[in-house]
Image (tube, rainbow, N blue to C red):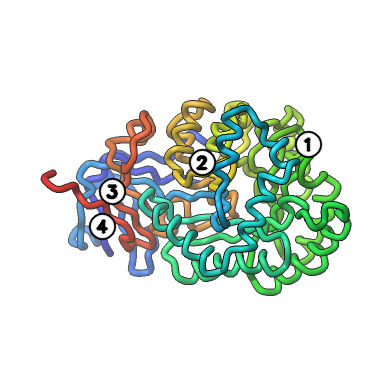
Amino acid sequence: MPVLADIAELAVCPPDTPQADIGLVRDAALAWDAAGRVVYAGPQSGLPQTLRNAPTTSAEGRTVVPGLVDAHTHLAFGGDRAGEFTARLLGAEYLALARQGGGIASTVRATREASEEELYDRARTALDRMLALGVTTVEAKSGYGLNLPDEVKTLRVYQRLAREGPQRIVPTCLGAHIVPPEFADNREGYLRLLEDEIIPAVAQGGLARFFDGFVEDTAFSPGEARRLFAAARRHGLVPKLHADQLTDTSGAALAVEVGAASADHLECISEDGIAAMAASNVVAVSLPIATLVLGVEPLPARRLIDAGVPVAVATDFNPGSAPSLDLHLAAWLACTRQRMTPHEVLKGLTAFAAKALLLDDVGSLLPGFRADFAVLDAPSVEAWLYGFRPQTVVQTAIGGQTVFRRLAPPGS
């Protein structure tokens, strides 16, 4: 049973405690078994006698946290939207670009044109970069195919990536992203396509765990989303929502009503929406990179946390509103723009992010959980998130196996 010793701070991140409780242990050690499950996480002085002679490596006074969980990404897509980035900088609004055929619709065109191998190669590269950030679990959405063959194409990419590892991939069918252009004058036809063909095929092929819907003026109404979530439930897919991002559509309350695992975005959530979520098990997922890029106010994290709603933090990695996969950047923005403390943010990157994906064996380093962890080049969690510094992860492990190690620069 390997042991990692000399840990300045070990955050075990218990899943059932308040947002600020990361289960901090100082002068700690971590041990795991041959199956890659944690058997000890506590003070080094309390290491059981049976582990005193186990193979031991040193964290050299660094901080160790659970492997990070990115609970909202659009991992595989074709093309980019660099031109729209410039247009937005010159004053163009996101909704206006979408109405003109840009935005999501432009990425749909590029994704349909891309081969499955091209999508795989881009996603594989992104996942490798995430490993260097300590990200060991990734939720991955479709939603840029919006027809049966191209939605399945994207989800097959995720299936292959999950099979190859090393990260755990949690696939989500975002068939209700927008109504694709060919159905612009036939919304009912696209709703039927989702109900009768796409959702059943995805479920029967075991291609997704969740079904996601974008509830917004330029996407789907609450009534349409209700209908699609009912179909998803009939086929064993759990709802998720892009909710209250650009306007208040009562998406938070809808997420509670349909028993969603999470409601994501929530920049425009109402007090009634917060109250509804506080009385439920729905996780709020904050996406601060998107709000930075779009120049809007982020999810009101303090109000949600104070109400008792668990808040996860994710990148929303996508080619339009969040063209960055850097979960550390999202974490730092959650501190600086949403006034979340470093401990609250870490809980949102780990245990609460896992909860948003209905995972019960990652996101924590309590005994029995998978030994997925990251070693940070910082003496504490607060020091890690005090400033935005690149390349702070020196080691990433999945199931106790090192899958990334940062080499020291020459002459160091």
Residue tagged by mark 1? 249
Identify the amino acid type marked 4: Val
Q: Position of residue 231 (x, y in %)?
A: 81, 61
- One can see residue 307 in this view: yes
Mark 3 or 4: the one toward you: 3
Q: Which mark is residue 348?
A: 2
Identify the amino acid type marked 1: Thr
Q: Which of 279/145 is in front? A: 145
Mark 1 or 4: the one toward you: 1
Side of 14 where 278 appears, left or right: right
Q: Residue at x 37, y 46 (%)?
A: 65
Q: Residue at x 26, y 57 (%)?
A: 3
Q: Position of residue 388 (x, y in %)?
A: 37, 33
Q: Is the residue under label 2 in contact with that under label 3 (CB below 8 Å)?
A: no
Ranked by sequence position, the earlier of labels 3 and 2 is 2
Residue 190 vs 244, above or below: the answer is below
